[in-house]
Amino acid sequence: MRIKKLIILLISILCILAIGITTILIVYNSGDNKEKIIVKGVVTDYLTKYKNLDGSCLQYLAMNITGSDMEFKGMQELFAKQLEFKIKSVKKTEDYYTVKTEIENVDYGNVMYKLKNEYADSTTITGEKLTALIMSELAKSDVAKRNFSCDIIVSRYGNEYRIQMTPDLSNAILGGFNEFLENEIEERLQQ
């Protein structure tokens, strides 16, 4: 009878320990998940405000030195309006979060190559005319689009989470503009 009581007591203690350890793990992991939800919200808010031409989107960037809102003009406005995104995952590293995001936007390179081929023989096209042609192409509802896989870096600064403007993020929100310019420069240097 005494052995039975010891076994019941031992099983009870083990159950209490298991429940305690499970509770601690749940509480610990929920804090990490809470931060991931906050980080995902920061990226979602930034990209949504950017798409909706809300200049206060700059408040989410780590390097917003001026503290003022941005004004969407010209091509940047057309890029922003076409932007769509989907957050794939949020991963925490030691110092920051990586938010894997799929961004669909205008394919600026495609637009430029199309215009380049269309006006290859033209020697009289001015910068003003070229800008008008680019703007016209970018504004079309059937403009070519492209997917950009982007790792958005989010760091914590005190109680705030801020997005690092990386070359990949900049390229994605500008429809591949940066990549196009880089390729054009390389091509001209090789000539």
Image (cartoon, rainbow, N blue to C red):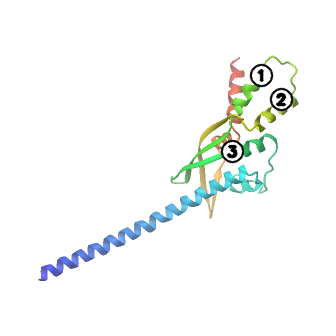
How packed mark 3 is, by other alpha carbons closer than 10 Å (few <14, some 14-19, many 20 or more), is many
Q: Is residue 130 left or right of residue 58?
A: right
Q: Is residue 103 above or below residue 28?
A: above
How packed mark 2 is, by other alpha carbons closer than 10 Å (few <14, some 14-19, many 20 or more), is some
Distance CA(mark 2)–CA(mark 3): 23 Å
Which mark, residue 130?
2
Say which residue label 1 marks: 118
Q: In terms of sequence position, does the residue under pointer 1 or pointer 3 come before the other? A: 3
Q: Of helix, strand and loop, which one carries label 1?
A: helix
Which mark, residue 171?
none
Q: Nearer the viewer, residue 90 or 111?
A: 111
Residue type, label 3:
Leu
Q: Of helix, strand and loop, which one carries label 2?
A: helix
Residue type, label 2:
Leu
| Image quadrant in which the C terminus is located | top right
Residue type, label 1:
Glu
How packed mark 1 is, by other alpha carbons closer than 10 Å (few <14, some 14-19, many 20 or more), is few
Asked whether residue 32 appears in the rendered view, the answer is yes
Q: Identify the image quadrant of residue 11.
A: bottom left
Say which residue label 3 marks: 83
CB under 8 Å between discs 1 and 2:
no
State the residue lying farthest toward the front: 142
x, y (%) of residue 77? 78, 44
x, y (%) of residue 172? 66, 41
Q: In terms of sequence position, does the residue under pointer 1 or pointer 2 come before the other? A: 1
Distance CA(mark 1)–CA(mark 3): 26 Å
CB under 8 Å between discs 2 and 3:
no
Q: Nearer the viewer, residue 19 or 48?
A: 48
x, y (%) of residue 158? 62, 63
x, y (%) of residue 101? 58, 46
